Amino acid sequence: MKGYRICFVFALLLTVISSGMLLVNPIIMSQIVDNVIVGQEINGVIVRQSDMLIPYVLLMVGFTLLRTGVSYGMIILYEKASQGTIYSIRNYLYRNMQFQDSNFYDRNRTGDLMTRLTGDLDMVRHTIAWIVRMLLDSSVMFIATTVYFLTKDVIFTLVLLVITPFIFIITQMFSKRVGPLYVDLRERLSQLNSNAQENIAGNRVVKAFAREDYEIARFAEKSRNFQEANIRSSMMWLNFYPAIEGLAQSLSVITLVVGGIFVINGRLTIGDLTAFSSLTWTLSNPMRMLGSLLNDLQRFFASAAKIIELYYHRSSIVNRHDAVSKDARFEGKVEFKNVSLTFGKTTVLKNLNFTVEPGETVAIMGSTGSGKTLMVSLIPRLYDITEGQILVDDVPVNRWELKCLRKNIGIATQDVFLFSDTVDGNIAYGDSSLSEEDVKKYANLAAADFVYRMEDGFDTIVGERGVGLSGGQKQRIALARALAIRPAILILDDTTSAVDLETEKYIQHSLNSLDYRSTKFITAQRISTTQNADKIIILQDGKIVEMGTHDELLQKQGYYYEIYCLQNEGVKITSV
């Protein structure tokens, strides 16, 4: 609440003042009844202060207007404090998410993270702006009314308060039972949001397999589960509501019965009974509200637990205290020394050793699941290695400052994500200061000439909700985006898999004739992509089983040789 604490404290202070002012009008009303309507007996004569009626009424109107103004200011302060607080929390959560490692996103569903940034935060706002205010308001009203009643008649006050312990016992029982229900309700909402997000993101797949009915049924099931969880939590509250409401309403009955007897016996005046009757709701309402407030508080605790978890979550991939940084561009030398990577009990990369000199091109091949993508992901520290060392320009990657390391690495993947922005904006994403001429230059290098044929050219909006692009077109825009930052190290993860051979040949020529030196790591399955590389690495089950140039690997007649024969209609290479 930094920046909004004073605002919140003033809101709390105005709540106390506003709640205390509720006593004023009933007290004035008791004076009107006793002094103006009923009158006082003086020397056997009933004297009524009729001339005080107008002043009393004006006083009541004045206090009503004053309390209205105080309440108005109080609500504004609460809203300002609550909105400002969740604004700060939301920005912090989002910023914290930006620095999480890949493992974090592997473990957490997108829909769940979205729920934390929206619904859960709104519950925090509701708590600050409403629940806290009502708890304080109810407490002040209850205490102030009790004190006033005690000054009038102790026995009458104790009779009214005798049912209070029973209400607290019931609300405590309710609180214990409803808590787990709201944790379950929060989880089902997260599942519902995740299902909707996945369906929207994968709408092309749904349509391609004609699975609309299946997805509708799947969403309906999640929606029904959420509905049932809502009903269970609501029914739990409704099971306790009659008891709480009945006990709260019994105060009015006690006031009429006991108060009436005390008036007949002369223990209380009619004005006192009028004030008591007017203020009874300030005792009963806090009791009645208590269950509802506890209901909302349990929902808040369920949401707050998820927010706190994200708020304090820290990435395992962070800058060291002695991190190295430099303004100059990297040379691009990369060295793997006995590198291994383990997830849980599974070792996915085992004892990798090789060196790539600046400007060299390395092609990485292997069957699906061999670890190609994971291996190149280790260079920008998207994952941290378990054993060994990876050195960039002879410095271990975990010693480089993350921002410095990654701004020297350009990445384009097969699974392309384009932002809902223009083509120009997507290509210049890594360097927003890029000129229009440079954007076109790198688009040409990536064979993205199709952009010129679009209606709005480079101003065409693309992305999830933009103009539909083919897989190859998206890959070429992603490649242009990677080239545009002029990286010292360029990682192309099966980037040309969706383009035709002629376009791939053009792209290969462009990569070989860049106007800046760049060390290239290219994962691919096409021999046409890998054959001109300075070094070809064959991965199998996370291990390097072959390494060499195109000609050297053909002579070995291993995996690379078999792929070459398959892609060249069974051509056999005779060993020398």
Image (spheres, grey):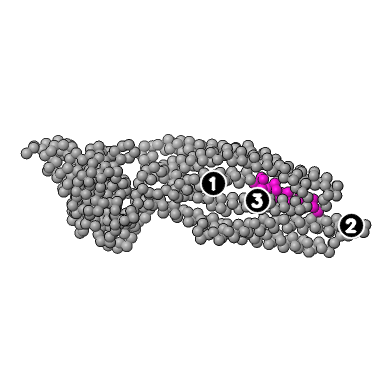
Which residue is label 1 attached to? 300
C-alpha separation, residue under disc 3 versus residue under disc 2 = 38 Å
Which disc, if any, is residue 41? Answer: 2
- Alpha carbon of mark 1 to alpha carbon of mark 2: how far? 57 Å
User: In the image, what residue occupies the spot 46% across and 38% down?
Assistant: 219
Q: Which residues are magenta?
A: 271-289
Residue depicted at 51% across the width and 39% down the height: 184
**Residue 393 place in picture, x, y as percent:** 22, 54
Give the structural element (helix, strand or loop) at label 2: strand
Where's residue 329, x and y in %?
25, 59
* Mark 3 crowd level (few <14, some 14–19, many ≥20, 10 Å Cα): many
Return the residue nearer the eye: 103 or 189: 103
Q: Residues within 10 Å of mark 1 (few under 14, many from 20)?
A: many
Which residue type carries mark 3? Ser
Tell me the residue that label 3 is attached to: 138
User: Does the residue at mark 1 contact the one at mark 3 (Cβ under 8 Å)?
Assistant: no
Mark 3 vs 2, N-terminal side: 2
Tell me which amino acid carries mark 1: Phe
Q: Secondary structure at mark 3?
A: helix
Image point (29%, 57%), residue name: 324
User: Which of the two labelled residues, at mark 1 and mark 3, occupies the earlier sequence position?
Assistant: 3
- In the image, taking residue 87 as reference, residue 395 lies left or right, namely left
